[in-house]
Image (cartoon, rainbow, N blue to C red):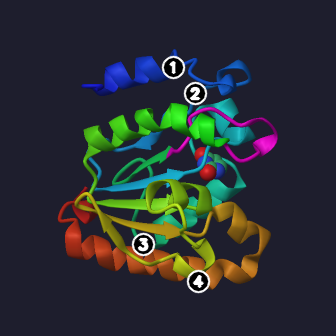
Amino acid sequence: MIQSWDELNAACLACQRCELCKTRTNVVVGVGNPNSEVMFIGEGPGENEDLQGEPFVGKGGILLDKMLCAVDLDRHTNIYIANIVKCRPPHNRDPKPEEQEQCINWLRSQVSLIRPKIIVCLGRIAGCRIIKPDLRITREHGVWFKKGGIWMTAMLHPAAVLRDPRKKPEAFADFLNLREKIKEVCPDTYNM
Ligand code: URA
């Protein structure tokens, strides 16, 4: 098992465990405070993320940052953001199960180093992989599950909200719900 962030970063940057290494520009390891109590997990880098080497920096990322700001969260201060796969799937297709399988141990190492109290899965792919395989995102977003001592919930993916802006109120309600959970179980997040 990986012991340090330096070791993890070096291993991810050199990773050739799946085909996605052949088409990537950057490996998108993650962004944020490694001492966070709250971790967000998306699906995988898109074009902008691949070019810039940081998760959620396209239009969806701008929406995510706004929703985070509304509940006093910030990607550089009191949360950490990573993805299920760290290299961009071509044409933004869903990451294949074998790609997820090859990549998931990097994410496990990130979770072990951070030891978050809350994990928020952004979208169906992350929710099904992390919370439960039969998660129904439309029905179960905002619902809390506890696994291995960690509180987990799934939210609508920002890209899905951008595609259908009528979903904004329910997406925002999940952030308000998250803020309450943070106040309940994370003593440090709002003091970082
Ligand atoms: N979508 C994701 O799921 N993750 C990113 O980093 C960007 C877009």
User: CB of mark 2 within 8 Å of CB of mark 1?
Assistant: yes
* Residue identified by numbered label 4: 170
Quadrant housing residue 59: bottom right
Q: Position of residue 134 (x, y in %)?
A: 55, 67
* Mark 1 vs ligand 1: CB below 8 Å: no
Q: Position of residue 191 (x, y in %)?
A: 22, 61
Q: Amino acid type of disc 1?
A: Leu
Which stretch appears magenta?
Answer: 83-95
Taking the image as shown, residue 102 lies to the left or right of residue 118, namely right
The local crowd at label 3, few if under 14, some if 14 to 19, many if 20 or more residues have their Cα within 10 Å, is: some
Which badge, 2 or 3, comes first in the chain's sequence? Answer: 2
Instruction: Report the Cα–Cα distance between label 1 and label 3.
Output: 33 Å
Callout 1: helix, strand or loop? helix
* Residue identified by numbered label 2: 27
Q: Is residue 145 above or below residue 92?
A: below
Q: Which disc number belongs to residue 13?
A: 1
168 falls in the magenta region: no
| Residue drawn where x is 61% and y is 36% of the image | 98
* Mark 3 vs ligand 1: CB below 8 Å: no
| Residue drawn where x is 68% and y is 80% of the image | 167
Residue 121 can be seen in this image: yes
Instruction: Report the Cα–Cα distance between label 2 and label 3.
Output: 29 Å
Which SS does the magenta portion mostly show? Answer: loop
